[in-house]
Amino acid sequence: MNATITNAKAFMEIQEEFGSFSKYIWNFVDGTPIKNNVKIYKEAPANTPLSDAISKDLKKRGFKFVGSTVIYAQMQATGMVNDHEASCFRYHEV
């Protein structure tokens, strides 16, 4: 429970500094989603140097439980990175 409170406070600090958490997080990709060329979904990485960097920055800002794999999953979920298979109809739509 303490980590939840700590993360909420750090989240609000980022909102205040950047105007929104979205602006903060999308700055890492210059507002443009990364399109990976995944042929088979199993080839998609669990983390990347970028997710390492975001994780490190969040930890520096006081966040807890924000490892690189968790951050990469968040990047996939929010569309910062497109890991659809290149043959998937959603690949070009995303």
Image: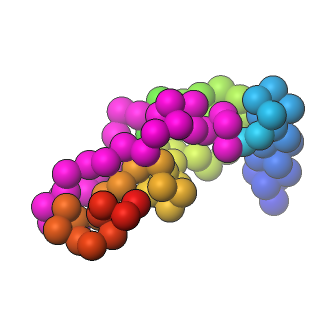
Q: How many marks?
A: 0
Residue 19 drawn in magenta: no
Q: Quadrant of the N terminus?
A: bottom right
The answer to whether residue 10 shows anywhere in this view is: no
Quarter assignment of residue 17? top right
Nearer to me, 27 or 56: 27
Q: Residue at x 72, y 42 (%)?
A: 21
Residue 80's place in the image compared with 13, above or below, is below
Q: Is residue 47 left or right of residue 27?
A: left
Residue 13 in the image: x percent, y percent? 83, 33
Q: Is residue 23 left or right of residue 2?
A: left
Q: Residue at x 77, y 40 (%)?
A: 20
Region of the chain picked out in magenta, as a range: 22-50
Residue 86 in the image: x percent, y percent? 19, 61
Q: Which residue is outermost to the left?
A: 39
Q: Which residue is outermost to the bottom?
A: 89
Quarter assignment of residue 11? top right
